[in-house]
């Protein structure tokens, strides 16, 4: 998993706490979903997530 500043902020009134991109490694059980980018059952796009707090 890659984490860091994704330059995508939440709406006013929400404080960002953490964010990342789901990018599993070859030893991760979910790697079968994304594989090496070829012949996989899902898209080659990656899931982006962000934890927020309502302020």
Image (cartoon, rainbow, N blue to C red):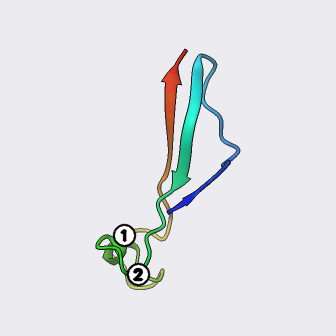
Q: How many marks?
A: 2
Which of 42 and 52 lies nearest the eye of the viewer? 52
Q: Residue at x 46, y 83 (%)?
A: 36
Q: Is residue 4 above or below residue 55?
A: below
Q: Is residue 19 above or below residue 39?
A: above
Q: Does residue 43 appear to the left or right of 2 in the view shown? A: left
Select label 2 or label 1 by which is in front. 2
Mark 2 residue element: loop
Label 1 crowd bin: few (<14), some (14–19), many (20+), radius 10 Å:
few
Q: Position of residue 11 (x, y in %)?
A: 61, 24
Q: Position of residue 42 (x, y in %)?
A: 36, 69
Q: Residue at x 50, y 62 (%)?
A: 46
- Picture quadrant where residue 15 is located: top right
Q: Residue at x 48, y 71 (%)?
A: 44
Q: Is residue 32 above or below residue 47?
A: below
Label 2 crowd bin: few (<14), some (14–19), many (20+), radius 10 Å:
few
Q: Which residue is mark 2?
A: 26
Q: Position of residue 6 (x, y in %)?
A: 66, 49
Q: Earlier in the sequence, mark 2 or mark 1?
A: 2
Q: Which residue is mark 1?
A: 42
In which quadrant will I find the C terminus?
Answer: top right
């Amino acid at each position: 998993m890659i984490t860091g500043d994704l330059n995508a902020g939440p709406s006013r009134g929400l404080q960002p706490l953490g964010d990342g991109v789901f990018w599993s490694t070859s030893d991760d059980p979910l790697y079968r979903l994304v594989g090496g980018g070829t012949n996989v059952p899902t898209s080659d796009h990656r899931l982006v997530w962000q934890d927020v707090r309502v302020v």
